[in-house]
Amino acid sequence: MSKPSLLILPGDGIGPEVMTEVRRVIDWLEKEKDISFDVTEDIVGGAAYDAHGTPLHDDTMAKAQEVDAVLLGAVGGPKYDALDFNVKPERGLLRLRKEMDLFANLRPAVCFDALAAASSLKHDVIAGLDIMIVRELTSGVYFGEPRGVFTEGNERVGINTQRYTTSEIQRVARAAFELAKKRNGKLCSMEKANVMESGVLWREEVQKIADAEYPEIETSHMYADAGAMQLVRAPKQFDVIVTDNLFGDLLSDIAAMLTGSLGMLPSASLGLPMANGRPKALYEPVHGSAPDIAGQGLANPIACILSFAMALRYSFDMGEAAALVEGAVEAALADGLRTPDLMTVEGGTKVGTTEMTDAILAKMAAA
Ligand code: NAD
Ligand code: IPM
Ligand code: MN
């Protein structure tokens, strides 16, 4: 049987730094567990702009469509801030998501015991936290038309359009309900049906699916602003949260801080099944290119390593290998190892990007 294929796109800033660490995990699995992938690497974001004048070359897009899974580091950075909007690094990532039709973005937020003190919230509020945000990723205000900056009389006007169709809402809702079924049977949908018609439609469609297909799931609805407040006040009331593209972007950054750091949060962006039955998939940490720490060996590699673990689970049916990686991360943290983003007043042993991975690999070997 041919090996599963993986396209690695390190990107910009700390992207290549954390991806180097993921490659060490991949190499370890090959050497020690005989699990191997057909890995190819390419460029995206600012790196692709520098090389080709576009943040995503058509050849790279075509490769992404062919492989079993894509793993992306991060894109963007101050060097590219002044670029024309359509060639900004972020456009490369958005094109990947849109053309691969990756409508369901799974952003789990798990608070590892050892990190309960690294969160800005009280221990009791976040200890044992395990929630899953499902963010719609290919529609909404990120892609709606009309959009652009126009001139109206003496004024300039910036326009983006929030737009959802019933089928777009239904397919992401179903993905979220399916996850809720495998987890704690609870789903909360968030929008702003009090002020947005798209929110009214969102709420109606989610409820219809709940009634018709998932009566056993405890379904609730919340305005997204109240949801943001509840995520900080009492996050453990949630299991699966399903929400639109923009609210999901904001709510998942909030959820990141419940776990201790943005450097901890992985994600999986999933689309429709391919001919081989695997879903189209792109895995990436929730964090960005972190220009403030790039090039210093300080980045936390865990979000990217856990994103690879999600690939093992969701694309390759390698739940055991995924659990091995996740368990090793937990064990390294339990030993008190902390990249600077995880340091708190309670201390721990300060390590850099490479040392954190050394420890994770050692735990994998010892497991
Ligand atoms: P960011 O996530 O890059 O950084 C926010 C803060 O979190 C910074 O202080 C950073 O040092 C810290 N941080 C993030 N990841 C970390 C890690 N792994 N280890 C330790 N600390 C970490 O967000 P930003 O500063 O708002 O954006 C910087 C650039 O990244 C922008 O160009 C933005 O568009 C882009 N971005 C890209 C993605 C992506 O590629 N998926 C996601 C978010 C932002
Ligand atoms: C994310 C990022 C992206 C988004 C940007 C970089 C396009 O913030 O993945 O959370 O807004 O979706
Ligand atoms: Mn974001």
Image (cartoon, rainbow, N blue to C red):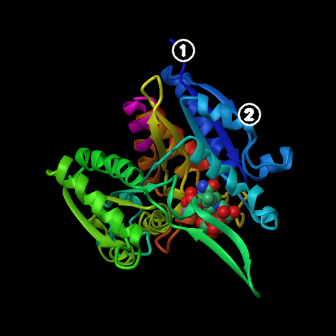
Residue 51 lies, in percent from the top left, at 85, 44
Q: Nearer the viewer, residue 39 or 155?
A: 155
- Whether residue 225 can be seen here: yes
The residue stretch that appears in magenta: 314-326
Residue at x 72% of width, y 46% of height: 44
Disc 2 secondary structure class: helix
Which corner quadrant holds the C terminus?
Answer: top left
Q: Residue at x 47, y 24 (%)?
A: 275
| Residue type of the residue flagged with mark 1 | Ser
In this rendering, position of residue 247 left or right of residue 47: left
For the view shown, which residue lies furthest in the front direction? 153
Residue at mark 1? 2
Q: Answer with the quadrant where ligand 1 appears in the image.
A: bottom right
Question: As drawn, which residue projects farthest toward the left?
Answer: 216
Residue 287 in view, yes or no: no
Q: Is residue 171 above or below residue 320?
A: below
- Residue type indicated by callout 2: Asp
Residue 319 falls inside the magenta stretch: yes
40 or 354, which lies in front?
40
Q: Nearer the viewer, mark 2 or mark 1?
A: 2
Secondary structure of the residue carrying numbered label 1: loop
Residue at 44% from the left image edge and 57% from the top image edge? 135
User: Residue 12: x and y, percent?
Assistant: 73, 52
Give residue 113's mark: none
Considering the whole magenta stretch, tell me its main secondary structure: helix
Q: In terms of depth relative to the viewer, which is nearer, 311 or 115?
A: 311
Per the image, the residue denoted by label 2 is 59
Vertical placement of residue 65 versus 56, above or below: above
Let me know if residue 229 is in the magenta part: no
Q: Residue at x 54, y 56 (%)?
A: 286
Residue 151, image x, y percentages: 75, 78
From the viewer's perspective, tell me whether residue 128 is left or right of residue 332.
left
